[in-house]
Amino acid sequence: MELLLALIFIIGYAVITLEHTLHINKAAPALITGVLCWTVYMLYSSDAHAVNHHLVEHLGEMSGIIFFLLGAMVIVELIDAHDGFQIITDRITTDSPRKLLWIIGFITFFLSAVLDNLTTTIVMVSLLRKIIADKQDRLFYAGMVVVAANAGGAWSPIGDVTTTMLWIGGQVTVGAIVTKLILPSLACLAVPLLYLSWKMKKTAPVLPPVKATKSSTTTARERNTVFSLGVGGLLFVPIFKTLTHLPPYMGILLVLGVMWAVTELLHHKKDLLEKGRYSAIHALQKIDAASVLFFLGILAAIAALQSAGMLSKLAVWLSETIADQNVIVVTIGLLSAVIDNVPLVAAAMGMYPLEQFPPDHSFWLFLAYCAGTGGSCLIIGSAAGVAAMGMERIDFFWYLKKISLLALMGYFAGVAVYLLQTQIL
């Protein structure tokens, strides 16, 4: 069974990477792979009830991520429909690609720590569409947004799903993860940016054209209201989670409901045709549903591998084969570029009890950094990458050629900073 599951996953993964060569949207092979993995798991299992129980358990986790993604995408579309991003784009006046790269990088880095890497990527890619007209230039900046979002999410307990898991599980505390991971995370972003700044200076590229600001069809009051409500709502989601202990998707759905009602009230005096352009219903029609289904298929496939015990066995094999714990954690981080970091971290949490590694142990903090940033090495290695891939139609091999090496440089720079920091302190 395990060999067949691995084969289905590898073939499905290969078809996804060859999306543009085969002319098949990546959502189709992802859904087929997810369903086939569960089908094989069911057919080879002697307890159908247990398999269905596992599926329902994972469905809760998957639907939480899917609804969070849907809510965030609709909120961003509502802000966009009201020209809300014009408030930011009007203030980015630089015509230097190097300066723009640093501005975008650090806005993404710190925003990701406050929101999370997925939401931040959705916001920043939408923002890039307003700033950079050329598709190829925009793809490059979108790739760096993925690197910056994952680096920014790694040093915050609410910046990435894995850091949130470790925080809720008691493996790390807020103070430790912020103080001990901010420098490695900064290095993870700064090294690629420094390299790119040097390369841009040497090659003297053509400056990316900036889109001219269009005359807005909304009033300043409408723009400011929707932008403030949208961004404020996204910032409120982690606060809502902390206060209520409900999952983040409940907070995002609350914010979406409020924004839906407010936008309806803002335009209630307009005729039906004009009002429709600014409604949540119109925003729902504009979001990329195929990307959401792709995400669902990938999550389903990974969940099947996890339920079959394959990921836990992989973690045990790593522990037995590689004696050095730091090497194990670095390897887990690199594996997260291929296999979702959530089940990998979940497997590690199950393998190593708190009695062995107490809260804020170096193992947990290093795991938070590596699992959070290692996924940047491939476009489908993180939720941020999947979101950017869907929004900008980023090709797997384009990312591999243009961004992966930069992400790997940043990843190992952060590893070096963390290990050096640990030795000094």
Image: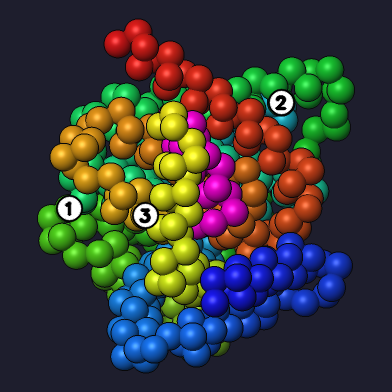
Disc 1/disc 3 C-alpha distance (Å):
25 Å
- Which residue is labeled 3 in the image? 347
User: Foreground residue, 143 or 375?
Assistant: 375
The kind of residue tagged 3 is: Ala
Mark 1 nearby-residue class (10 Å; few <14, some 14–19, many ≥20): few
For the record, the magenta segment spans 326-342
User: Foreground residue, 395 or 49?
Assistant: 49
Q: Is residue 368 left or right of residue 299?
A: left
- Which residue is labeled 2 in the image? 196
In the rendered image, residue 70, in percent from the top left (x then y), is placed at: 45, 71
In the rendered image, residue 350, in percent from the top left (x then y), is placed at: 29, 53
Q: At 50% from the left edge and 25% from the top edge, which residue is drawn?
A: 414
Mark positioned earlier in the residue sequence (1 or 3): 1
Chief secondary structure of the magenta span? helix
Q: In the image, is residue 367 above or below residue 298?
A: above
241 falls in the magenta region = no
When asked about the image quadrant of residue 258, the answer is bottom left
- Residue 242 — which label? 1
In the rendered image, residue 228, in percent from the top left (x then y), is placed at: 35, 53
Q: At 55% from the left edge and 23% from the top edge, which residue is drawn?
A: 413
Q: At 43% from the left edge and 50% from the top edge, which residue is drawn?
A: 315
Q: Is residue 121 visible?
A: no
Quadrant (top left/top right/bottom left/bottom right) for the C terminus: top left
Q: In the image, is residue 36 above or below residue 199?
A: below
Disc 2/disc 3 C-alpha distance (Å):
36 Å
